[in-house]
Image (cartoon, rainbow, N blue to C red):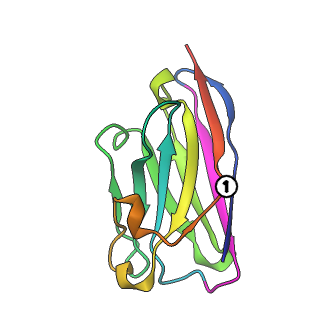
Amino acid sequence: VQLQAFGGGLVQAGGSLRLSCAASGRTFSRFSMGWFRQAQGKEREFVLGISGISGSTSAADTVKDRFTISRDDAKNTVYLHMNSLKPEDTAVYYCALAPLTYSGYAPTHPNRYDYWGQGTLVTVSS
């Protein structure tokens, strides 16, 4: 499985970005997907996840009123929609795919994920 994340860039505070993560090498549906981020000098943290079966989502408290996640199984792609961006959202954003064991929900711990994209940098200027 290969995951490719793209869509990052430089944006002003209050702006919006949409990240995409395209999967190849495996049937995409039924697998839960997650977005994580890692700021410089900090640990990787969970942002949003979407389950493979129901499409239910979960979000970190820091982003739940501003970011959303969606998936298009026909395109093998998951999206991260980011609104009202803040400078503290600056980080490298990673998408990840969890094993079928977690198809009912997207886990929040990075160790639960099998495959990772290469990351895309989001920089929010003040």
Q: Is residue 95 above or below residue 84?
A: below
Main secondary structure along the magenta-highlighted residues? strand
Residue most extreme to the front: 41
Crowd class of label 1 (few under 14; some 14 to 19; many from 20; radius 10 Å): some
Residue 17 is inside the magenta segment: yes
At a point 50% along the width and 41% down the height, the residue shown is: 38
Q: Would you say 61 lies left or right of 116 here?
A: left
Residue most extreme to the left: 61
Query: Label 1: which residue?
Result: 118
Residue 112 is inside the magenta segment: no
Looking at the rendering, the stretch of residues picked out in magenta corresponds to 15-27
Q: Would you say 29 lies left or right of 68 here?
A: right
Q: 86 or 120: nearer the eye?
A: 120
Secondary structure of the residue carrying numbered label 1:
loop
Q: Is residue 12 above or below residue 22?
A: above
Q: Would you say 88 lies left or right of 126 here?
A: left
The C terminus - image quarter: top right
At a point 62% along the width and 28% down the height, the residue shown is: 123
Q: Is residue 4 above or below residue 89?
A: below
Residue 61: percent from left, percent from top: 28, 42
The N terminus - image quarter: bottom right
At a point 47% along the width and 51% down the height, the residue shown is: 36
At a point 58% along the width and 34% down the height, the residue shown is: 16
Q: Is residue 64 above or below residue 42?
A: below
**Image mark count:** 1
Q: Classify residue 4 by image quadrant.
A: bottom right
Q: Callout 1, which amino acid? A: Gln
Residue 96: percent from left, percent from top: 53, 64
Q: 7 or 36: nearer the eye?
A: 36
Residue 14: percent from left, percent from top: 52, 23
Residue 69: percent from left, percent from top: 47, 56
